[in-house]
């Protein structure tokens, strides 16, 4: 690209933008000290929905500033408002932004990490041109509508229907565990369009208006006490055929695009510096505070936690480098997601062994009962983005090349499956 800035020029551009629009953080990095500051180690932030809407408005305003300054989609196509700059420029921006106080951007993780890439690959040119700039500017927020009460791990077994009516499709059914549905404007949805085909063949993807008549969003209360997820009901919801993703009855390919990006996003998100939420320093000081740091069994268990996070970090880096080089996420991203949940579960078990009854009895002591939020959150992570059992099958079959388990319903029309 003839007008592509050098990395130094881009650094100056980004720094000038950040200096003009955000407050720089203090240079000194505060070291973790046991008993100081917040002891929150939740996997899911529990906020009331009024406060959540305030935070969303701030996040959208920041995203719009970035986009208007040419920094909202650094690697994206210029026709959709991107800069088409190499991945190194995106990484540079991300590293520079961490030095400033900016609104949390987690509201857009699903929309930009999973839904937008699917729209870019499978939507019509008109829909791409309409939705992608709005998503990256945060004029609209996207969610993912896949799981159903009877089809979570077995996504291809979903029963939500889409029936064609001229230039529109009529959707009926229910989706569940939908993060962010209550503040989303659009959703990527997979529905069954032909029950006479085998279950993987009769699916079609769509982009649905979450504010359309017939869409009802209800919060789902989790055992953590919060309601990060929702169930969504569709009653005669009309979607124009122009908002179909890919060809009719080829929705499984569309779903795979989203799922691979989802596992890449979730798996990479937990790597951080190698320990994710639970830093090795926090765990070390936990052991010291409760007088077990010299116990050889505890030390061995802590080393196991640390080593497994480090291995996951390096494996994730290898996979993310492939994506940054322009390759699509592959089945190896299932390893990243499986490693993350395994490591979180390993951490939760370690903390439980050290704390004992303190983890379930709220005595007000710092750094004890707060770990219960992690314990209650891990089971949800073991389901999000594909259950551990499904991911192991994917790894065995598509990564290791092991024989596929015989599927008794592989060639059976979905309508016949329902009868049985």
Image: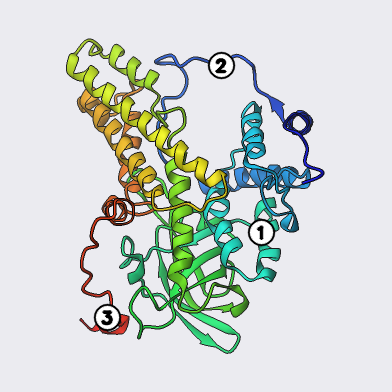
| Residue at x 54%, y 58% (from the top left corner) | 115
Q: Is residue 125 left or right of residue 37?
A: right
Q: Secondary structure at mark 3?
A: loop
Q: Which residue is mark 1?
A: 132
The disc at residue 412 is: 3
Residue positioned most to the right? 3
Its colouring scheme is rainbow
Task: Select label 2 or label 3 by which is in front.
Answer: 3
Q: Earlier in the sequence, mark 3 or mark 1?
A: 1
Q: Examine the rendered structure and indicate whether residue 272 appears above or below residue 333.
A: above
Separation (CA) of disc 2 from disc 1: 37 Å
Residue in the foreground of this view, choosing between 351 and 280: 280
Task: Select label 2 or label 1 by which is in front.
Answer: 1
Task: Select label 3 or label 1 by which is in front.
Answer: 3
Separation (CA) of disc 2 from disc 3: 59 Å
Few, some or many residues within 10 Å of mark 3 (<14, 14–19, 20+): some
């Amino acid at each position: 690209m003839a007008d592509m800035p050098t990395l130094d020029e881009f650094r100056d551009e980004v720094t000038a933008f950040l200096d003009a629009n955000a407050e720089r953080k203090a240079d000194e990095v505060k070291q973790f000290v046991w008993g100081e500051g917040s002891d929150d180690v939740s996997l899911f932030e529990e906020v009331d929905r009024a406060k959540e809407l305030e935070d969303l408005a701030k996040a959208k305003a920041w995203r719009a500033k970035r986009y208007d300054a040419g920094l909202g989609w650094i690697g994206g196509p210029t026709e959709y408002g991107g800069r088409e700059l190499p991945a190194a420029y995106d990484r540079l921006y991300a590293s520079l932004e961490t030095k400033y106080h900016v609104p949390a951007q987690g509201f857009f993780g699903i929309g930009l990490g999973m839904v937008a890439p699917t729209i870019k690959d499978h939507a019509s040119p008109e829909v791409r041109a309409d939705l992608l700039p709005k998503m990256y500017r945060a004029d609209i927020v996207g969610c993912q509508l896949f799981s159903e009460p009877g089809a979570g791990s077995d996504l291809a077994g979903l029963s939500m229907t889409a029936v064609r009516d001229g230039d529109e499709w009529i959707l009926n059914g229910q989706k569940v565990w939908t993060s962010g549905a209550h503040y989303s404007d659009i959703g990527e949805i997979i529905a069954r369009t032909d029950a006479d085909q085998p279950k993987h063949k009769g699916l079609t993807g769509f982009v649905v208006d979450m504010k359309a008549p017939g869409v009802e969003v209800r919060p789902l209360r989790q055992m953590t006490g919060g309601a990060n997820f929702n169930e969504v009901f569709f009653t005669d919801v009309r979607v124009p055929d122009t908002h179909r993703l890919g060809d009719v009855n080829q929705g499984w390919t569309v779903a795979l695009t989203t799922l691979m990006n989802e596992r890449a996003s979730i798996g990479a998100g937990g790597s951080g510096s190698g320990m994710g939420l639970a830093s090795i320093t926090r765990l070390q000081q936990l052991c010291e505070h409760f007088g077990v740091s010299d116990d050889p069994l505890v030390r061995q268990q802590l080393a196991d936690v640390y080593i497994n996070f480090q291995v996951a970090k390096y494996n994730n880096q290898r996979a993310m480098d492939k994506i940054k080089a322009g390759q699509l996420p592959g089945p190896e991203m299932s390893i990243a997601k499986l490693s993350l949940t395994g490591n979180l579960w390993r951490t939760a078990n370690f903390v439980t062994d050290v704390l004992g009854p303190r983890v379930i009895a709220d005595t007000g002591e710092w750094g004890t009962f707060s770990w219960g939020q992690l314990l209650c959150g891990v089971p949800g992570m073991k389901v999000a983005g594909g259950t551990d059992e499904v991911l192991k099958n994917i790894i065995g079959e598509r990564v290791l090349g092991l024989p596929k388990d015989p599927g008794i319903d592989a060639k059976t029309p979905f309508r016949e499956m329902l009868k049985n």
